[in-house]
Amino acid sequence: MKHTITILSEENNIGGTSYHDIVINASKNEIEKKLGIQAYVNGNDPKTKYEWELELDNKIPFTIYDYNMNEFGDDDIIEYHVGWKSTSYNDELDNDGFPTSIDGLNIVEALVEQGFSISPSKVWQIIHSNNK
């Protein structure tokens, strides 16, 4: 299924998204080029410089944002967090690093369709490699 990613509509409220250990390793400029959507410069949160408030298939709100990355340039490749509204209290990744919710799986699928490399965060990988 080909998904549609758009800027969040005014009817949807982005509040309540959270990080679920999924990241995009990319630069700000690469994300803007692939999505065709400019980043929102977050002046209210000192931990986040750039954020995209997005909607999948006109119904599933999600965000892409840097977090605690200090100084970086628009062409520097960093880990951008992907956040969405959790449909269950414990919406985590399974042992293979895939989201356990349908919304999470659809968001990952849509980002892969756009050409992004999606992976579990480095922290998730370290924790799970130590548990094996």
Image (cartoon, rainbow, N blue to C red):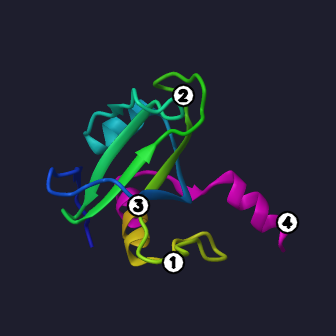
Of marks 3 and 4, which one's residue comes earlier in the chain? 3
Task: Please provide the residue range marked out in magenta.
Answer: 109-132
Q: Which type of secondary structure does the marked residue at label 3 adopt?
A: strand
Label 2 to label 3, Cα distance in Å?
A: 24 Å
**Amino acid type, callout 3:** Trp
Q: Which type of secondary structure does the marked residue at label 2 adopt?
A: loop
**Amino acid type, callout 2:** Asp
Residue toward you, 82 or 17: 17
Which residue has dot 3 on it? 84
CB within 8 Å, label 4 to label 2: no
Label 4 to label 2, Cα distance in Å?
A: 29 Å
Decide: few, some or many residues near mark 4? Use Cα within 10 Å; few <14, some 14-19, many ≥20.
few
Image quarter of the N terminus: bottom left
Of marks 1 and 2, which one's residue comes earlier in the chain? 2
**Amino acid type, callout 4:** Asn
Q: Which mark is residue 76?
A: 2
The label nearer to you, 1 versus 3, is 3
Which residue has dot 1 on it? 100
